[in-house]
Image: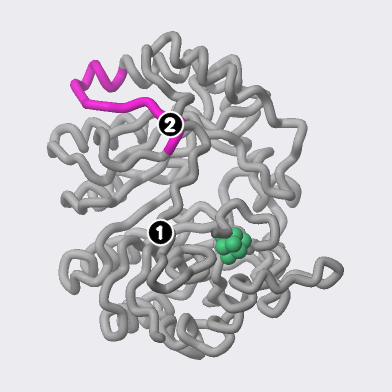
Amino acid sequence: MKINRLDSVMLELTDFCNLSCPMCDQSGHRGINTTRSIHGYPKRFINKSLISKLLENIKTDFKRIDNIALFWQGESLMHPDFTEILERVLEDIGSNKVIKSFLLHTNAILMDKKIRNILLQQEIKGSAVHFSIDSSCSSIYNIIRRGGDFSIVQNNIKEFLKLKKSRNLFHPVTNLQFIVMKENENDALKFYRYWKNFLEEINMDYSVSSDIVYNVAPVCIYFRKLGTGPETKSEIHCSYDNVLQIIEMESGIDLTSKKNSIEINIDKENEVACKSAWYSPVISSNGIVTACCLDMKLDYLLGNIENDTLYEIWNSETAWQFRKNIKKRKYNQSGINSVDNPLLCSNCKFLI
Ligand code: SF4
């Protein structure tokens, strides 16, 4: 069987970041000035020609890709050719119709007028932009988003939202993200009030949520639980439930009933064991294809788009053997994580 329809392709434009946040696996414990990436190779910017090659392959060999995510471990807007790459991807979405939408996560520090204008060029259904903010004031922002400038971030996001309103766009759905941590838990209510007031001032519809929502309103004030990956520092966890209750009381919106629900549509026909390993390749900034966005160390190395096409890699013997191993729960707990021994999957909540 050949897979030619994908839920998403995650494409890392760079693993450099301009911040060093305590909760981030990429920068938190390695420091902003280090060049060694969490992937285990020197940090880099993806080569533009590699992106062209990928997009050509997508056009030729794939029937449908629901979403292209232009980020993974770094801050994508740092890429020196970011605007060119973004324009090329959006052009492809509009013209060849294989890729249906885009997704971007950014800290918004470098989101200047030109980038805002490109992101808000047209209504692309299913698209979304997430802004990592995490605070309502510079004193807390400086503790969490180390190396950033709160007033620039706030201004860039407000200008983005005003432009979006003036163009009457629903998409890209805009998530104003607040990751709840010990450092900012007392700031959550102020964050909610700040953005609520601003959105009402510009007459923009919005939702408030503890889940990512893409079709409720053009903007979402999103309270996110801190990830619990092995690299995340335990001391920055806090009572997420308490924070949600406070926001619920203030907003009158139910945030807890659907909290942490993971909806997995089981693909009975193809008997998938994990949607990611079947339908969501991840490509690092050096072209390596892995089967999972949780695989920071690139242990699930399936190939490199410098040498083969994504279609070839995703349908290769190695990829199918990996999927078989997941399905059969073939792990050796004393071994190391790899395609042949997918230990990372052994206690994964996404395993069906
Ligand atoms: S089961 Fe979990 S760790 Fe394994 S590929 Fe799927 S999402 Fe990744």
85 sits left or right of 149 in the view: left
User: Residue 85 at x, y = what percent?
Assistant: 34, 65
Front-lying residue, 75 or 338: 338
Label number found at residue 274: none
Front-lying residue, 327 or 114: 327
Q: Does the magenta stretch include residue 134?
A: no
User: Pointer 1: what residue?
Assistant: 69
User: Residue 137 at x, y = what percent?
Assistant: 52, 19
Judge whether 252 appears above or below 313 on screen: above
288 sits left or right of 54 in the view: right
* Residue 159 in which image quadrant: top left
Q: Which residue is drawn at 49% across and 32% down?
A: 259
Q: Kindly report the distance in space between the C-alpha atoms of the residues bearing marks 2 and 1.
A: 19 Å
> Which residue is situated farthest in the top direction here?
250
User: Pointer 2: what residue?
Assistant: 222
Task: Classify 10 Å Cα crowding around label 1: few (below 14), some (14-19), many (20 and above).
Answer: many
Judge whether 161 appears above or below 88 on screen: above
Q: Does the magenta stretch include residue 205?
A: yes
Q: Provide the residue span drawn in magenta.
A: 198-211
Colouring style: one colour
